[in-house]
Image (spheres, rainbow, N blue to C red):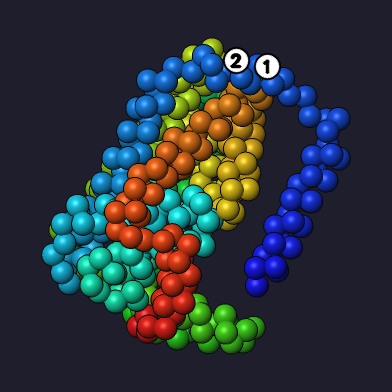
Amino acid sequence: MKSRNGLVWLAILLVLALVVFAYRGRIHFDWAVFWMQLRHVRWVHIAAGIALIYATFWLRATRWSVFLSATKKVSPLVLVGPQFVGFTAVALFGRLADVIRPALVARRVQLSISSQVAVYTIERMFDLGAAALIFSGALLFAPRDLPHHEIFVRTGLISLAGTALIAVFAVAIRVAGGAVARVAGAAIGWLSKPIGENVAQKIRGFREGLDAVSSAQDFVVVSLISLAMWGMIGCAYVETLHGFADTPELATISFSRTMLLMGASIGGSLLQLPVIGWFTQIAVTATAMHEFYGAPIEAATACGALLLVVTFLSIIPTGLVFARINHVSLKKAATEAATEAPSEPVH
């Protein structure tokens, strides 16, 4: 298995090397300007961005404690560690390691892994809905004199429509989750029975996750926490861009204009690969800043690198400390989570 993984990584590196070699003549990049941009960064803005990201982990822990309140009263302080450790695992081992987080919470609060996977599922839906609302609101009301204004409005409308579809889907699952799971599983089962069964299981898991929101008050609290958290993430992006004082295209950017960059960044992180994904993420955000805002490619790349540090890598030291304190091996936890979670019925 290890030799197969090694061959896969070797193939990926060879492909990347071939791409760089093929396009070497088309890439005009001044490394001196790149390093100058980093030297002139206003680090107070970077520190503010990191502080905002760290604060969101407290909000994540608080939100998870609300999800658990119907089953068990748990202090957010107990859940902060698993949040840091889980996202540190994603940063180091890729997006597939995200399953570590519900497994660590389950172990910490002595509940089943399947129940926390269900909570994780509903958490992600609240993340998606909150982010979409902030995107659509900010983009729809972007000033008309902004370059590419039509892109902002179109993206806002699409995001708003997506939010409405999520809401309708959630209501349908809450009212008749079992029936929806059977119909979806049967329909997809015509093409592939295993995929159909997996889809049905995911829907039932989402239905179980909705049970975590046991009252209208919990729904309001969780929604407000989600909106506040994603608003703070957006502000962390703004702070990072404002740190590049020598680049007016970035230093004076507004919150609403940052939303397109934030959306591109999130899209680029959905299939996060270990370590290599860091560089693809920088490439995605740098390209977005260059195309959307007209920032020089060197400044955009430097800003993309710092965005990765602020929003993704800055939590690694704290995550490793929490893992050390709680005697958690990240690699072992990822393996155990992947094998234990399916063994327990989600429904």
- What crowding class fits label 2: few (fewer than 14 Cα within 10 Å), some (14-19), or many (20 or more)? some
Relative to 202, is 66 above or below? above
Q: Residue 33: which quarter of the image?
A: top right
Please state the horizontal and vertical placement of residue 65, each as a whole percent of the image.
21, 59
Q: Determine whether, in the image, residue 172 is placed left or right of residue 109.
A: right
Residue shown at the point (57%, 84%) measured from the top left: 194
Q: Residue 332: which quarter of the image?
A: bottom left
Please state the horizontal and vertical placement of residue 308, each as a whole percent of the image.
51, 38
Asked if marks 1 and 2 touch (Cβ < 8 Å), the reply is: yes
Element carrying mark 2: helix
Q: Residue 74: which quarter of the image?
A: bottom left
Amino acid type at circle 2 is: Met
Element carrying mark 1: helix
Please state the horizontal and vertical placement of residue 150, each as a whole percent of the image.
57, 34
Q: How many marks?
A: 2
Please state the horizontal and vertical placement of residue 2, each as a whole percent of the image.
65, 68
Residue shown at the point (31%, 43%) measured from the top left: 56
- What crowding class fits label 1: few (fewer than 14 Cα within 10 Å), some (14-19), or many (20 or more)? few
Q: Nearer the viewer, residue 226 or 3?
A: 3
Quadrant holding the C terminus? bottom left
The residue beneath circle 1 is 32
Q: Nearer the viewer, residue 156 or 299?
A: 299
Residue shown at the point (33%, 60%) measured from the top left: 327
Relative to 119, is 278 above or below? above
Distance from disc 1 to disc 2, alpha carbons, whole Å, reads: 6 Å
Amino acid type at circle 1 is: Ala
The residue beneath circle 2 is 36
